Image (spheres, rainbow, N blue to C red):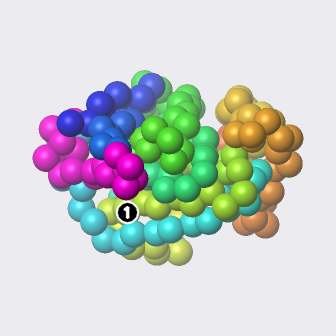
Amino acid sequence: MMQVRELAMSGAWEFTPKQFGDDRGVFLEWFKSSEFEAAVGAPLQLAQANCSVSAAGVLRGIHYTANPPGQAKYVTCVKGAFLDVIVDLRVGSPTFGTWDSVLIDDVDRRAVYLSAGLGHAILSLEDGSTVMYLCSLEYTPEFDHDVNPLDPDLRIDWPTTGRNGESLEYVLSAKDSMAPSFARAREEGLLPRA
């Protein structure tokens, strides 16, 4: 049985699986449809599965998909560690502009689910960190949008040290570093509605 915790905004949850270990290693169920549906109230429609490997300090996001059609994600870390950040980008939501974070790593093996309309970013906390995520919509460039993850208006508390205490130097893709600010994305009507 998984432990489930709803995050600071509606539509986002943390799932912590029960792990079974012995001298051979560890077994766990990182996704279980019945427990997911009991928590979320709907099934996860699976359309694509992704894997991303990152060096320490790599910051990916804040990414979101135009809603509709929207893209929900179920994310876990299979090696290393990430700070997983979810941002409520839904104009009209009671928690619009707020964020929450979960440490996903290869120790507690938590997973994070975020509904369509929420923004998502991950920061790698050590070299070789590997994240895998299930998506409800295939990647469609014309629906893909970004907000700059370092926008001071969002006040995201990004860590400056990695899992082993080393200093982190943020590394962003050109696309992410040139992403619009939160305010500009709102002014231009790019953000999803609640």
Q: Quadrant of residue 171?
A: bottom right
Q: Who's the residue at 23% across and 40% down the image?
A: 40
Q: In which quadrant will I find the N terminus?
A: top left
Residue 36 drawn in magenta: yes
Q: In which quadrant will I find the C terminus?
A: top left
Q: In front here: 54 or 147?
A: 54
Q: Quadrant of residue 136?
A: bottom left
Asked if one can make out residue 190 in the rendered structure from this viewpoint, the answer is no
Q: Amino acid at mark 1?
A: Cys
Q: Who's the residue at 51% across and 47% down the image?
A: 106
Q: Position of residue 79 (x, y in %)?
A: 55, 56
Asked if one can make out residue 154 in the rendered structure from this viewpoint, the answer is yes
On the image, numbered disc 1 is attached to which residue?
A: 135
Q: Is residue 36 left or right of residue 190?
A: left
Q: Who's the residue at 62% across and 57% down the image?
A: 129
Residue 133 drawn in magenta: no
Q: In front here: 181 or 161?
A: 161
Q: Is residue 168 above or below residue 139?
A: above
Q: Which residues are magenta?
A: 22-39
Q: Position of residue 66 (x, y in %)?
A: 46, 59
Q: Is residue 7 above or below residue 17?
A: above
**Count of marks overlaid on the render:** 1
